[in-house]
C-alpha cells in the first residue's frame, strides 16, 4: 500500500489541495446560502386544449310562420344568408331579418332571386313545381315575407296585383293639362 489509510473519495478530495482547487472552480460564485432555487408551487400538468368557451350568440328564428309582428321586430338572427328577405322584410348588416310592416310572417321558397318581381309568375311556379322532391334542392332559396292577412300567400305577383303598400302617400294634384292622377290605380280621368 502507499502508506496511509484508505479514505473515501469525498474525504480524500476535501483534504488535498487539488480537491480545494477543483471545488473552487466548480462552485465559483456566490455561496449556496445567497442563491435561491425557485421551485414550482403547483405541479406542471401540461397544456390542455379545452377549458375555454364563448357565450352563445342566440341565433335562430325568433318569429315563426303566421305569428304577428310589428315594424322593427327581429324575425331571424343568422350568420350568412341562409334565409333571404322577402316582401316587407329588411336585412341588417349582420344578415338579421326584421319586419318593415305590421302583419303575419310567411315562409316560402323559390328558385328565382326576386320571386315577387317575376316576369311570368306562371312560368316561375311551373319551374318550382318541376324541381325534384328533396329536402333542399339546389338553386332554391328560402324567403321570409310579411302579409296583411293570415290567408294571404307569398310570393305575391306584383305584376297582376300591383305592389302591396301600407302607405300610398298623398294623392297627386291635378296636372297642368287637367288630368287627375290617383295613386294606386292604373286609370286616370280627364276633367
Image (spheres, rainbow, N blue to C red):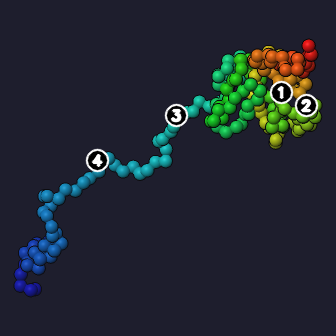
Front: mark 3 or 1 = 1
What secondary structure is found at the residue carrying circle 3? loop
Is residue 184 at all visible to an observer of this figure?
no
3 or 4: mark nearer the eye: 3
Q: Element at badge 1?
A: loop
Q: How many marks?
A: 4
Circles 2 and 1: CB distance less than 8 Å?
yes
Compared to 130, does 67 lie above or below? above
| Quadrant in which the C terminus is drawn | top right
Q: Quick one: which residue is furthest to the bottom in this view?
A: 2
Q: Identify whether 21 is placed above or below 95.
A: below
Q: Which residue is mark 2?
A: 121
Q: Is residue 96 left or right of residue 141?
A: left
Instruction: Mark 3 or mark 4: name the one nearer the start of the chain.
Output: 4
Q: CA distance from mark 2 to mark 1?
A: 9 Å
- Which residue is the site of mark 4? 41
**Does dot 4 land on a helix, a strand or a loop?**
loop
Residue 93 falls in image quadrant: top right
Between 54 and 74, the one lying in front of the other is 74
Secondary structure under the numbered disc 2 in the rendered image: helix
Mark 1 lies on residue: 155
- In the picture of the structure, the residue carrying the numbered disc 3 is 55
| Image location (x, y in percent) of residue 2 | 9, 86
At x 16%, y 74%, the residue is 25
- Per the model, the C-alpha gap separating discs 1 and 4 is 68 Å
Amino acid at each position: 500500500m502507499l502508506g496511509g489509510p484508505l479514505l473515501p473519495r469525498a474525504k480524500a478530495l476535501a483534504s488535498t489541495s487539488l480537491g480545494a482547487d477543483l471545488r473552487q472552480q466548480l462552485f465559483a460564485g456566490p455561496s449556496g446560502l445567497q442563491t435561491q432555487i425557485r421551485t414550482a408551487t403547483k405541479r406542471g400538468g401540461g397544456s390542455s386544449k379545452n377549458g375555454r368557451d364563448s357565450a352563445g350568440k342566440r341565433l335562430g328564428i325568433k318569429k315563426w310562420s303566421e305569428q304577428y309582428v310589428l315594424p322593427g321586430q327581429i324575425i331571424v338572427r343568422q350568420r350568412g344568408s341562409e334565409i333571404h328577405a322577402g316582401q316587407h322584410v329588411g336585412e341588417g348588416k349582420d344578415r338579421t331579418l326584421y319586419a318593415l310592416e305590421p302583419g303575419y310572417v310567411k315562409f316560402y321558397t323559390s328558385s328565382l332571386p326576386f320571386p315577387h318581381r317575376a316576369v311570368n309568375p306562371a312560368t316561375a311556379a311551373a319551374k318550382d313545381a318541376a324541381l325534384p322532391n328533396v329536402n333542399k334542392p339546389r338553386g332554391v332559396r328560402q324567403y321570409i315575407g310579411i302579409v296583411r292577412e293570415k290567408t294571404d300567400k307569398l310570393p305575391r305577383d306584383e305584376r297582376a296585383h300591383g305592389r302591396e303598400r301600407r302607405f300610398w302617400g298623398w294623392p297627386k294634384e291635378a296636372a297642368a293639362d287637367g288630368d287627375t292622377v290617383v295613386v294606386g290605380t292604373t286609370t286616370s280621368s280627364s276633367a
